[in-house]
């Protein structure tokens, strides 16, 4: 099928013509089809009802506005198929995914009543994954869905910024829920993405509100409304400042309100705190729902952003704390101090063990990720109370510096290292998985349920040690295994119970 035909078929389905059973009436039930669309002026609604029954039956209908006003009504005697006279409704309430305004169709058959939502909209093809919705260009941020679709899934999709669904025909109740919650239904198989709705990167890319820095040092920012049909009055924007991942109490979650119109932006200013103490200061914004919406409860976070304001951190200094001795084996070095013992394998350039006060900090070692059967060329020398090990791998190298306190510094410009994580999860100060944008949200987090790449990490904390980067580093977590690139350097600092 040519692309234009595909788009036309999609537009036809999205026009809100659908057929579904209403009420049983003897041997043959009564079915109906509603056509609810917009005239060329986009202000006048066109309503038509088609009724079908296998036996003579009287059907009464009325179309009601949100306030209960009757917009159209009639009584018909149906046998086989009956089409009602088209009704024109002036100044009709338009339906969009942002503003899912609905009318109610009341049907009465044999003194039995049923009620169904009706959406007035006009959807026309524009280009791939973009339609004209009521005359306005709207990009579809959609997902292909497999299997059974539940209300909980729809709620997660809504909070992730999804506005279009590509799925098999839905039961009537879920179709009506999609109308009331605000989803475009896109009928072409595999035409949209198959995203992970838990992905922080996806949510960040699809959010309706963006906040950008204008003069961040003076507290001047710009808020952008990327909606097509509604202002952002239904959002509240909270902000706060953190130093090294800890909120400054007196500025914790101040709240702002905006009425920025669709497709518009406005500048705003906030009063930032004095940032004199050493540390990494970050400003955080969250846009939350001010009221309950279908599938989205009041207080839900629907957009987020953060900015680095200042970093005047003072590098931590680690005293040697005692001399070290070295015992050489065939391929291994055993380095000992008063409270530390490290085993280093010169054959593959890896740390096999690191014990501080009889406690093993690296039960799985610290192993370079290299091609199979790669060998390392290693050298070492004792410099006062510290030991420096140099390892050269194929096309790369690393330097290990061990102090008598058990502090281990690893320097490498491109060698990944693998170590074992703890089942209880890790705490870190950095970005969520796969959020590589320069403005990505950075705060205190835990890796529990967050497997994947964690960029822009300042420090990572396990039960036994803390990893601190000379500059932000990246690590990847999977199945209790961590892979990190100490570029240019990370320092492992033992944590004492």
Image (cartoon, grey):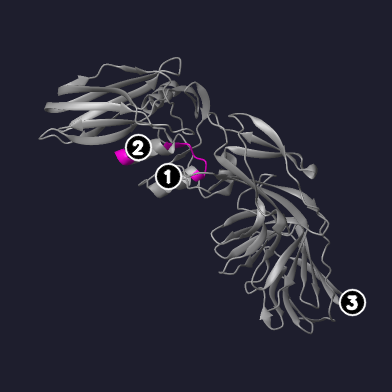
| SS category of the residue bearing label 2 | helix
Determine crowd level at label 3: few under 14, some 14-19, many 20+ residues with C-alpha closer than 10 A. few
The residue drawn where x is 71% and y is 74% is 495
Query: How busy is the neighbourhood of tag 2: few (under 14 within 10 Å), some, or many (20 plus)?
Result: some
Q: Please name whichever residue, 376 or 160, is drawn nearer the observer in this view of the structure.
A: 160
Q: Is residue 239 left or right of residue 166?
A: right
Q: What's the distance in space between the residues labelled 1 and 2, CA to CA?
A: 12 Å
In-image side of 24 versus 106 (left or right): left
Kindly identify which residue carries mark 1: 154
User: Most extreme residue toward the right, as rendered?
Assistant: 384
Q: Residue furthest top?
A: 40
Are the residues tagged 1 and 3 within 8 Å (C-beta)?
no
- Range drawn in magenta: 159-173
The answer to whether residue 355 is above or below residue 260 is below
Q: Which residue is mark 3?
A: 384
Residue occupying image coordinates x 63% and y 38%: 210
Looking at the image, residue 322 lies above or below residue 266: below
Between 234 and 482, the residue placed more toward the observer is 234
Residue 176 is tagged as 2
Label 3, secondary structure: give it.
loop
Looking at the figure, which quarter contains the N terminus? top left
Distance from disc 1 to disc 3, alpha carbons, whole Å, reads 63 Å
Residue 389 in picture, x, y percent from top left: 80, 70
Q: Which quadrant holds residue 493?
A: bottom right
Q: Nearer the viewer, mark 1 or mark 3?
A: 1
Q: Nearer the viewer, residue 314 or 390?
A: 314
Q: Counting residues from the N terminus, which is met first, the one under dot 1 or under dot 3?
A: 1
Q: Main secondary structure of the magenta part?
A: loop
């Amino acid at each position: 099928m040519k692309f234009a035909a595909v788009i036309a078929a999609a537009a036809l389905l999205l026009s809100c013509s659908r057929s579904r059973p209403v009420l049983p009436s003897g041997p043959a039930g009564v079915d109906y089809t509603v056509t609810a669309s917009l005239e060329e002026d986009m202000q006048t609604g066109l309503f038509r009802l088609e009724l079908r029954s296998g036996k003579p039956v009287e059907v009464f209908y009325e179309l009601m506005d949100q306030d209960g006003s009757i917009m159209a009504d009639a009584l018909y005697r149906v046998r086989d198929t009956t089409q009602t006279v088209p009704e024109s409704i002036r100044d009709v309430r338009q339906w969009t995914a942002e503003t899912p305004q609905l009318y109610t169709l009341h049907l009465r058959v044999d003194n039995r009543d049923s009620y169904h939502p009706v959406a007035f909209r006009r959807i026309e093809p524009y280009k791939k994954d973009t339609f004209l919705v009521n005359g306005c260009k709207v990009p579809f941020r959609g997902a292909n869905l497999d299997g059974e679709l539940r209300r909980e899934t729809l709620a997660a999709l809504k909070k992730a910024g999804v506005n279009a669904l590509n799925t098999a025909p839905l039961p009537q109740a879920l179709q009506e829920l999609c109308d009331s919650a605000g989803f475009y239904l896109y009928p072409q198989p595999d035409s949209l993405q198959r995203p992970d709705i838990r992905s922080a990167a996806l949510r960040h890319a699809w959010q309706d509100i963006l906040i950008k820095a204008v003069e961040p040092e003076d507290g001047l920012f710009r808020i952008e409304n990327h909606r097509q049909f509604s202002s952002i009055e239904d959002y509240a924007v909270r902000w706060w400042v953190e130093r090294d991942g800890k909120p400054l109490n007196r500025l914790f979650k101040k709240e702002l309100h905006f009425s920025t119109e669709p497709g518009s932006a406005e500048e705003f200013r906030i009063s930032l705190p004095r940032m004199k103490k050493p540390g990494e200061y970050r400003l955080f914004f969250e846009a939350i729902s001010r009221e309950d919406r279908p599938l989205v409860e009041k207080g839900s976070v629907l957009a987020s952003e953060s900015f680095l304001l200042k970093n005047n951190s003072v590098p931590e200094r680690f005293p040697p704390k005692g001399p070290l001795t070295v015992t050489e084996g065939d391929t291994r070095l055993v380095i000992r101090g008063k409270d530390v013992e490290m085993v280093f394998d010169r054959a593959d350039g890896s740390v096999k063990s690191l014990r501080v006060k009889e406690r093993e900090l690296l039960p799985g070692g610290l192993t370079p990720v290299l091609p199979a059967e790669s060998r390392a060329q290693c050298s070492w020398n004792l410099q006062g109370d510290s030991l420096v090990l140099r390892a050269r791998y194929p096309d790369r190298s690393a330097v290990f510096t061990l102090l008598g306190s058990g502090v281990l510094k690893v320097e490498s410009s491109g060698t990944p290292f693998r170590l074992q994580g703890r089942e209880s999860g890790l705490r870190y100060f950095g970005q969520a998985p796969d959020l590589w944008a320069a403005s990505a949200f950075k705060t205190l987090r835990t890796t529990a349920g967050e497997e994947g790449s964690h960029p822009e990490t300042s420090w990572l904390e396990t039960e036994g040690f803390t990893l601190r980067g000379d500059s932000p580093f990246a690590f990847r977590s999977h199945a209790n295994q961590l892979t990190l690139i100490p570029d240019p350097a990370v320092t492992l600092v033992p944590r004492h119970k």
